Amino acid sequence: SQPAVKATVQVDGATATGTYTPTDNLEDGQHTVIVYGKDYDGNQSDNATATFTVDTIPPVLNVTSPTENLKTNVAALTVAGTTSDATSSPVTVKITVGTQVFNPTVGENGAFSQEVTLSEGANTITIEATDSAGKVTTVTRHVTLDTAGPEISNPTLTPNPVDGGATVTVTVTITDTA
């Protein structure tokens, strides 16, 4: 149910209060309140107006880079995407990678881009879009930085020694930690 709107007016120390409760939920968007006074003689004051915005929907957040579960051997990575909110623009973006926090500029078209530096191993990248009403949308990406090459060990030849022209089988163990 909608909360009541309460108005308080003071005239020469006398206080009058009143409430208004909308009969239906107010839709998302801008609304205007108009207040005026009328005395017993029918004289009406000028209108006083105030506008407010109802926003129940968080912003849209589309992260185009990086993809989820990306594996890379380059520490520099661009986090990019778009965000929008029909009711409560502008939208701000915060990107967190470990202890690094970035606040990239969001263009008029909602696009943002930020270069970050990954740490070796597993990295969690959190992208948050926050509209001016404080509604938040979060997208998380997991990226692995693997700059170490695989290790090759235990090479064996079979048969050993080998006859000229015979087939030789080479066996090795390859280990990659990422």
Image (tube, rainbow, N blue to C red):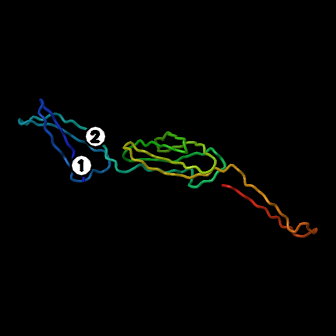
Tell me if 114 is positioned left or right of 174 in this view.
left
Residue that protrudes farthest toward the left in the picture: 41
Query: Looking at the picture, which amino acid does disc 1 mark?
Result: Pro
User: Which structural element holds mark 2?
Assistant: strand
Question: In which quadrant of the rendered image does the C terminus lie?
Answer: bottom right
Q: Can you tell which of label 1 and label 2 is closer to the viewer?
A: 1
The x and y percentages for residue 162 are: 91, 67
Quadrant position of residue 113: top right
Asked if 72 appears above or below 164 in the picture, the reply is above
Q: Nearer the viewer, residue 100 or 17?
A: 100
Tell me if 158 is positioned left or right of 6 in this view.
right
Residue wearing tag 2:
51
Quadrant position of residue 167: bottom right
Residue at image coords 61%, 45%? 119
Around disc 1, counting alpha carbons within 10 Å, would you say few (fewer than 14), some (14 to 19), or many (20 or more)? few
Residue at image coords 73%, 55%? 150
Q: Which of 11 and 163 is in front in this view?
A: 163
Tell me if 176 is positioned left or right of 100 in this view.
right
Q: Which of marks 1 and 2 is nearer the N terminus?
A: 1
The x and y percentages for residue 169 are: 83, 67
Asked if 166 appears above or below 58 in the picture, the reply is below
User: Which structural element holds mark 1?
Assistant: loop
Q: Nearer the viewer, residue 43 or 112?
A: 112
Question: In which quadrant of the rendered image does the N terminus lie?
Answer: bottom left
Residue at image coords 17%, 34%? 46
Q: Nearer the viewer, residue 25 or 38?
A: 25
Query: Looking at the picture, which amino acid does disc 2 mark?
Result: Thr
Asked if 111 appears above or below 10 in the picture, the reply is below
Label ID, residue 3:
1
User: How far apart in space, not on screen, are marks 1 and 2 (Cα)?
Assistant: 17 Å
